[in-house]
Image (cartoon, rainbow, N blue to C red):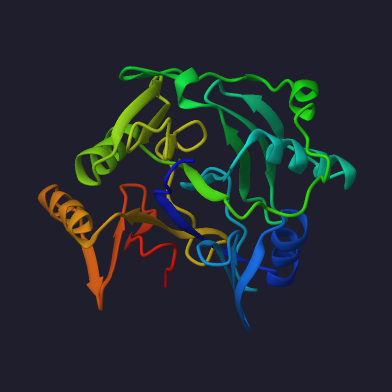
């Protein structure tokens, strides 16, 4: 199981009740905390994976803007993916796609407000990691073969070992994004899809962050008070590692907001990122 690098995804939604019902009863996440206008969800009861904040007056995010392409929930095994897919079939939930990426098998959908979601299970790294080379592709998912691994007990909600495996972002420019994430935050380049997409990671994972310009080359950020991604967090193993990243970011002239232990930066596409130390899944 991959050690999580992406922490909590924070979304602005117009209808908290509807969105919370989807994530709790359709996706099977557990409610970790609820206030009047916000809800936080978890898989294991400790690590916050998703935070929703309601703004009834928010404008729906326009398509050709920077921000979230999808967030990706990584399941612990193939059987769990088969169980989730059978659950979606049983409730007739519309899906957007199902793919075999060689490194993983994945299904795609959207929440009630259009935020992209991937739910996936990794194959063993032995099958896709050859030295420093990682092979990824996109092919049709063999659904019949996957369903052979469905468990006898069936879907029981999101498995407790589920983590936020990666985040995929729409960015305005790949060159500046690569400079920020690799030279600044210390990610390694894994794979370029031509000049329109880049996949980066740490610890030789296939990718913790995807960056693409398929529908966002030169695009602006969403209008103020739009729905969608508010910020996401990146996890560091120690305070020392976080400070190393801060020094690298400072060296490339990234503005850094610091207050009472909170550190927030923005990437070149105006996407806000909270830099956190991973205290065993307990986040603010």
Residue at 49% over, 18% down? 127
Residue closest to the far front: 152
Residue at 30% over, 54% down? 236
Q: Nearer the viewer, residue 209 or 156?
A: 156
Q: Is residue 206 left or right of residue 107?
A: left
**Residue 119, x across and y down, in percent:** 63, 41
Q: Quadrant of the C terminus?
A: bottom left
**Residue 150, x across and y down, in percent:** 78, 35
Residue 56, by quadrant, is bottom right
Residue closest to the far left: 251
Q: Nearer the viewer, residue 27 or 20?
A: 27
Residue at 72% over, 57% down? 28
Residue closest to the far bottom: 36
Residue at 70% over, 63% down? 19
**Residue 163, x across and y down, in percent:** 53, 50
Residue 211 lies, with reference to residue 262, above or below; the image says above
Q: Nearer the viewer, residue 44 or 49?
A: 44
Q: How many marks?
A: 0
Q: Is residue 182 left or right of residue 70?
A: left
Q: Nearer the viewer, residue 236 or 219?
A: 236
Residue 3 lies, with reference to residue 198, above or below; the image says below
**Residue 148, x across and y down, in percent:** 79, 26
């Amino acid at each position: 199981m991959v050690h999580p690098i992406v922490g909590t995804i924070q979304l602005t939604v117009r209808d908290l009740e509807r969105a919370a019902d989807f994530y709790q009863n359709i996706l099977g996440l557990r409610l970790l905390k609820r206030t009047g206008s916000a809800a936080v969800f978890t898989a294991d009861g400790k690590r916050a994976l998703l935070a929703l904040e309601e703004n009834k007056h928010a404008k729906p995010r326009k398509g050709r803007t920077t921000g979230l392409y999808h967030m990706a929930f990584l399941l612990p095994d193939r059987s769990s993916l088969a169980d989730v897919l059978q659950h979606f079939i049983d409730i007739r939930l519309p899906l957007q796609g199902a793919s075999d990426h060689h490194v993983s098998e994945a299904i795609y959908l959207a929440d009630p407000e259009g935020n992209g979601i991937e739910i996936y299970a990794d194959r063993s790294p032995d099958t896709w990691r050859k030295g420093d080379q990682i092979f990824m592709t996109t092919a049709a998912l063999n659904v019949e073969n996957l369903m052979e691994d469905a468990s006898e007990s069936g879907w029981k909600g999101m498995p407790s070992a589920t983590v936020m495996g990666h985040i995929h972002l729409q960015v305005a420019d790949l060159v500046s994004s690569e400079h920020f994430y690799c030279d600044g935050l210390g990610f390694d380049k894994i794979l370029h899809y031509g000049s329109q997409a880049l996949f980066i990671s740490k610890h030789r994972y296939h990718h913790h962050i995807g960056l693409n310009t398929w529908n966002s080359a030169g695009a602006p950020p969403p209008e103020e008070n739009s729905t969608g991604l508010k910020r996401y967090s990146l996890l560091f193993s120690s305070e020392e590692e976080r400070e190393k990243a801060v020094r690298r970011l400072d060296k490339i002239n990234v503005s850094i907001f610091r207050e009472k232990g909170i550190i927030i930066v923005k990437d070149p596409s105006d996407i806000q990122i909270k830099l956190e130390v991973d205290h065993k899944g307990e986040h603010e």
